[in-house]
Image: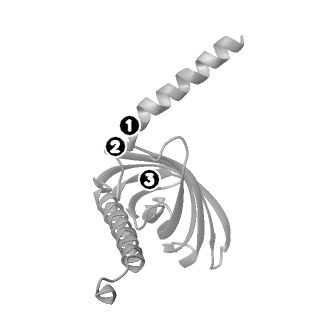
Amino acid sequence: MKGIRLMSLIGLMSLGLCMDGMIHAQTYTTAAGIRLGNSIGFSVNQRVTKKWTVEGIVQNDFKETTNFHLLARRHHSLLTRRANWYYGAGAHIGSDTEVGTLAGFDGVLGIEMTLLRFNVSLDVKPSWSSGENNGMRLNGAASVRYVILQDKVFRDWDRKRKQRARRKKRNRWKGKMKERKPSRAGNA
């Protein structure tokens, strides 16, 4: 029994390592697509730093409400860098046929995976709205986005940052070596 568990663990780890190369190769800077849940919408994700994205959502329930949401999301890796869980917060503004203008705050908690040129996510988005029908709502949705821009920008930025750090370290080392060498002018 222990042998089967060990083999299963080794097999899963090997599969994860093999998939890491395939999944890790594709990531996104900008992705856009549809969002399906309590309502239908359009979602655009823009990576702003290595672990932060900004998401804009326009959604309509085809009955009463149309909303625009702007969310900041913090990402954390799961199995690989391309499989993430995230959380965040933001705000929304919209209109409701019964209430009029709505405004409020949103939270978000979800998971996402980027494979090839597609980003798929599942999330829960609690929101609080002001107005006559103020109160909490809990929305869940699945989003499928096409990766418009890959993360080459951030890979280049990271590579240049590392080069600057190496150059700075090398220059510090050269400066220390000059301090240690006695000057030849004083020996003459």
The answer to which quarter of the image holds residue 160 is bottom left
The residue pinned by badge 1 equals 21
Residue 152 locus on image (x, y percent): 29, 57
Residue 10 locus on image (x, y percent): 56, 22
Residue 66 versus residue 106: which sits nearer the camera? 106
Tag nearer the camera, 3 or 2:
2
Q: Residues within 10 Å of mark 1 (few under 14, many from 20)?
A: few
Q: Is residue 76 left or right of residue 181?
A: right
The residue pinned by badge 2 equals 25
Q: Is residue 136 above or below residue 138?
A: below
> In terms of secondary structure, where does tag 3 sit?
strand
Q: Describe the colour scheme in one phrase.
A: one colour
Q: Which part of the image, by quadrant, shows the C terminus?
A: bottom left
Q: Is residue 140 visible?
A: no
Residue 16 versus residue 168: which sits nearer the camera? 168
Residue 28 versus residue 40: which sits nearer the camera? 28
Residue 91 locus on image (x, y percent): 54, 74
> Identity of the amino acid at label 1?
Gly
> Identity of the amino acid at label 3?
Arg
Pointers 2 and 1 in contact (C-beta within 8 Å):
yes
> Identity of the amino acid at label 2?
Ala
The residue pinned by badge 3 equals 35
